[in-house]
Amino acid sequence: MRRCRRQWHCRKAGIVVLTVLATSLPAIGQSLRPMEGSVAVMVEPGMLQYGGFGEILPARVGKLLERVGLPSRNLDVGDLTTPDLLNPRDFPVLVMLSGNAFPEPALTALQRYHRAGGCLVLCGVPFCHPCSRKGDRWESTGHRNHFHHDDNGMGTGGFTRIADGTVRIEHYGFQSNVLGLGDRIDLPRTAHIQCLDPATLHAKDEVIPIIGFFRDSARDAVPAAAIIRHGCKHFNGAIDAWLGQIASAPGEQSHYLATQLLTRSVALCLHEKGRITRDERDAIFTMMDAAAKPSPLPSGLTYVPLPRPWGDTYLPKSPPPRRRLLVVDASECAREERIALWCLQALTSRTQPRLWIDITPEDRFWLDWHMEKGHIDGFDPVDDWRSVFATFRTAYSGAIVPDPDLYRSDLLALNMAACEDLVVTTRELAHTLDIPVKIDLRGRFETYAEGMEWVWATYGSRLSRHLCGYHCSQRLDVGAFAYALQWRGTVFWLAGSIDGAEPGADIHREKHVLARIMSELAPNTPILGFPSGGEGIGPGEPAGVAFASTYAKALVCNDLLRNTCVTSGVRIEQWEQPPQSKPPELERDKIYIALALSDGDNQNTWRAFMGRYFEHPAHGSVPVAYGMGPPIVDIQPAIARWYFEHAAPDTEFFADVSGIAYTKPGVYGAAYTDRAAVLDGFLDWTGRYLEKMDMHTLRTVHGDDALLTRYAERLPGMHSIVADMGCYSGYKGIENLTYTLNGMPVFRAATTWRNGKDGFLPEIREHVGTVRPAFVNGFLHCWTFDDLAKIHEIHATRDPDMVFVTPTQLAGLYRAAHGKGWVQ
């Protein structure tokens, strides 16, 4: 019968924020005999991953195994499906770290391998999310389970859903844990994960728990990670390591735990298959015991507010641009040529912006607008873009050449260029432009982290302590980095799940280096750019914003902005909200809805995307509030002015998102001992810019009532708070979405984008029910409602008792309904 080893008493383990480096593992390869065969690792470029161990890149598994003396070979899907290539003789163990996802074209080959006794080391809930290649990318083909024991299954077992509880290392009878895990292994204190369901396995399969999930209401645990010894007829003799989701959380602790589980599981399978001896297996276990535990990221910082060296603005402003600009058409230039031009723009703008670069017609549109509004008198086209390097020869001292064989060497070069007044270019282009090469980085650094450590040690005192930026190497030719280079802002990039496989990438070491840099920058410092360059390129938006927020850095999303060195030189002091029409009279049988459109945290959208709403024939027919990031008045005020001047009577602009810039308020300043003081400093900046922009409400990302109360206390000039980027689980019913904190109305979002535009009105009806009057924050996701016609459609199909208003009117109606009078 199926056997699940008895669960023993629970040992509680605390959470420690840590990191681990593969190089911390002492190599013991010389102590192992040559092994017959190799460990196979599925490494398929672009393969999707759902759940599992996101902190270990498949391409890096070979290095981990090499450190313990185990040979491995990476196999892509083409290899897996090559007849007779994947077999237990040559590859006794196959490691697949794609979580729930798997390549459907390889299913038959994987079944054949497993039935022949091949061992699998897996994470997530494997074989339930088939994927196939469409063109040059992998896509999901739906949710279909292939983990059962049948002719089309893999026999690896399904899952059971478990509520929150405690995890613990499980013991093998009275012996040590089957993987030799000791009490020094830190586990999450509580979890909410899918565990292995032994009932989904064959009766003759043996389940040996590695880590158990202990429900507070139950005496026994279920396996959160386990070894499966197959005794069934389908997969008899195969051994699987079902490692689940226990190490799925982002961060260094999960990386350490995942490394331990994976390496030990491979060693166990190899021993039980007779490829290594018990002594060799135990030697690997001992080595893993000795592996350096992750060290904590910087924390416990002291909050010391520091004045901006450039003056009393959140972001630095260039000097007013030259009255006549030189305009370079770079639309046909190569990547390295554009990067050189952007460097030149940055260096010349330190004294006075003189150079405008055209890439698309949009650039010429805004140049014409600056001339129309009198910010410049005119411009002169440059016939040959190369000539400007001779024209501005005194602006730079030479060239710096990145290493083409080191991913993000160009970012290292930008930091040096900012301090040494250099142009980043190739040797060939430097020769063409007649620029002497002052620094050549080719072969200089082995890893990006090593290079960034050297840059900070060498140039940290010369780089700005009040400005930094996420800048993706793949997008440098866009030119957003020029503004950071102009002001000597530190630029960097954390690798993600895909670009983490690039030469010289080391995700966890990089995180430590950048955390140290962020900890030494001034608190409440803006961070430019964007932490995602596409799927798996960079840490991603949620993780990247949270990481920066921890160190009190607020994101200004300018990763696609061009010519900011010039546009930031414009000064516009007077801002007034568009005049609104007379508000409706309060009727107590109505539902009042304010439409609050994203994506104001993203400065890029104001270059062109938002224009589609203002130029649409239906503009002005529906009251719409547009979230706008307040730093727009520092870096592109003339563009913001275009929108203010083209607003309709029932248009309102509000601060998006979370205040002066984009943060995760729940973790903002978490690395500081006095988080309250850090947040107050952030809110002080927010209050000043709300007043400057004549804005009277803002949207936050998440944030509990205690946090929103702090906003209400520190920002008394607001009429309300339109909280949340969509309605989150936990907030159900209008009584939990609309209420008052510290005398200020709070309107939490009542809608999402998950059901598309057709879900907008049904979601409101669900939350409001029979409550009247009702006051609703109708969150509009701009990427879902990307056309004003879609907004006009929900207005046209509204219920008879629904009235659409601006946020100002919504707050006034709410106060009137509660006897507080109108907000003026």
Image (spheres, helix red, strand yellow):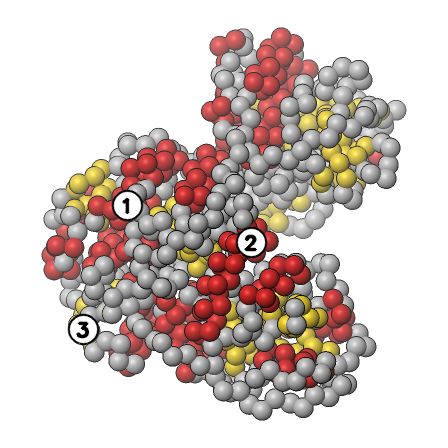
Q: Nearer the viewer, residue 515 or 44?
A: 515
Q: Is residue 434 left or right of residue 172?
A: left
Query: Which numbered disc, 3 or 2, marks the residue that appears first in the sequence?
Result: 3
User: Nearest the camera: 797 or 653?
Assistant: 653
Residue pointed to by mark 3: 324
Circles 3 and 1: CB atoms closer than 8 Å: no
Instruction: Give the foreground label among 3 and 2.
Output: 2
* Real-space CA distance between mark 3 and mark 2, rounded to the nearest whole angstrom: 47 Å
Residue 309 seen anywhere in this rendered image of the structure: yes
Circle 1 packing at 10 Å, graded few (<14), some (14-19), many (20+), is: some
Q: Amino acid at mark 3?
A: Arg
The disc labelled 1 sits on which kind of residue? Arg
SS label for mark 1: loop
Q: Is residue 183 left or right of residue 56?
A: right
Q: Mark yes or no: residue 84 visible.
A: no
Label of residue 75 in the image: none
- Give the crowd class for mark 3: few <14, some 14-19, many >=20 residues within 10 Å: some
Q: Position of residue 806 (x, y in %)?
A: 59, 81
Q: Residue at x 57, y 44 (%)?
A: 48
Q: Mark 1–mark 2 contact, CB under 8 Å?
A: no
Relative image position of residue 251 (x, y in whole percent):
56, 39
Which residue is found at the position 41% from the left and 79% from the top? 575
For the residues carrying marks 3 and 1, which lies nearer the camera in this image? 1
Within the image, what quadrant is residue 505 found in? top left
Question: Which residue in the protein does label 2 denote?
Answer: 676
Q: Nearer the viewer, mark 1 or mark 2?
A: 2
Residue position marked by numbered label 1 in the rendering: 462
